[in-house]
Amino acid sequence: MELFMAMCLLPLFCACLYLCKLVLQWRNQQCYLLAYECYKATDDRKLDTESCVKIIQRNKNLGLEEYRFLLKTIVNSGLGEETYGPRNVIAGREDCPSLEDALWEMDDIFSVTLDKLFDRTGISPSKIDILVVNVSLFSPAPSLTSRIINHYKMKKDIKAFNLSGMGCSGSLVAIDLVQNLFKTYKNVHAVVVSTESLGPNWYRGKVKPMILANCLYRSGGCSMLFTNNKALKHRALLKLECIVRTHHGSSDEGYGCSIQVEDKHGFRGFNLSKSIAKVAAKALTMNLRVLVRKVLPLTELLRYVIMSRRQNKVAEHRRGVGADGTGLNLKAGLEHFCIPPTEGAVVNGVGNSLGLNDYDLEPARMALHRFGNTSSGGLWYVLGYMEAKKRLKKRDKILMVSFGAGYECNNCVWVVLRDLHDANVWKDCIERYPPTTLVNPFMDRLSWINDERLSFVTFEEVMNAVRVGGVGPG
């Protein structure tokens, strides 16, 4: 009888042990954001429209058509007058960037953000167990992670990863890597550094899709500190609920729509093809099909299914799924939306596709206006704006949307663990935002760039007519 009882209890005991193991694994797999620090350059590196015009004038490869295209892009981009440019470009050395320039740019971003991060949290660099650095267009040897480890004298058994070529989505790629490492290592700290190398990659040719990067990208970046230590939950800002990655690299169209190439004159730059909008929409659609099942309540999913079945095929095609508005009410399960601050039209397009209003898009528009397109670090300026405006309340959920070369769409959802109100990188200007208008102050002065009569004006005449202050040919 006792043997029989033992045989009956053994499976139950094993099941209990297995459940305990799953619970412990789940506890260790939590990913908490303890702090983040966004980079802000010094005032002598500010790039207003006047400065941009001067930089454009230095490019002797531009013709009249390219000059007008650049000016139109700048005044309509959504960027304000206080973004920051690379040191060598501000100094007029974009034609001959040196390795020293590239390394200085990285060191400045690393030291400014990491020093503040370690000081804010009180966690020593020697306590960091995992380090992930994401810089798409610069990969020296030794690696950038090794450079940080050497500077801060980090531990010898640190797990270091250097990511390149990930584009604007690199920040979430790095976080996904950290989350997966947390499944193996218990009670550890991880630092992620996301930025971009602009100085050595300034395009000096005249191919329009490649010139765009010069108009939109600005100096910026962010360092973040994560942990899976449950005991530190009370200090955390956010908890990662889920992350979904979608990659369209198997498609030639997706692979080639955002790619680094050389033009016929040998000038290297980033080329954005006309198909990028279609590829991005498809990637976002496929990503959200997976993500919404994880974050939206069952009632909203059922409502969508019922409503969809009532639509005929034509109507359903127009409504789309995901990138055409999803047909779902995302606000049924999400309170805040971090849209990548890439360019004004892109922010509006993504917002419209997700059914967002001006209030939802304000953080992305303001981040773009104040700091420009800071590549993989951009989402954290958007988050910083939300925090500075005291929007983030306990238990709120935040959707982060990102796109990157490859072509990738990586999205994640965060849960706010306590009311957040730190002004962070916005502290010196948050009271001025949102401004009464986002219209470029040079719009009126540069209105001549839309005048078709310029088709009969020589480039030299236009250049001679331009004055500091944006006065054009009369």
Image (spheres, grey):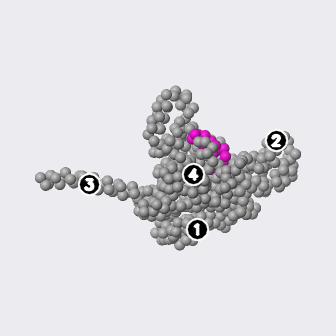
Q: Which residue is mark 3?
A: 14
Please state, as top left, top right, bottom left or bottom right, where the C terminus lies in the image: top right
- What residue sits right under mark 2 in the picture? 451
- Under mark 2, the amino acid is Asp
Disc 2 packing (10 Å; few <14; some 14–19; many ≥20): few
Q: Amino acid at mark 4?
A: Arg
Q: Amino acid at mark 3?
A: Cys
Residue that mark 1 sits on: 115
Q: Nearer the viewer, residue 424 or 30?
A: 424
Image quadrant in which you'd find residue 248:
top right
Above or below 115: residue 257: above
- Mark found first going from the N terminus, 1 or 4: 1
Residue furthest to the left in view is 1
Q: What residue is shown with label 4?
A: 391
Mark 3 Cα within 10 Å, few/some/many (few <14, many 20+)?
A: few
**Mark toward the viewer: 2 or 1:** 1
Mark 2 secondary-structure assignment: loop
Say which of marks 1 and 4 sits in front: 4
Task: Name which residue lies at 50% across and 56% down.
Answer: 418
- Amino acid type of the residue tagged 1 in the rendering: Asp
Give, as a single range, the part of the protein colored magenta: 341-355
C-alpha separation, residue under disc 3 versus residue under disc 4 = 47 Å
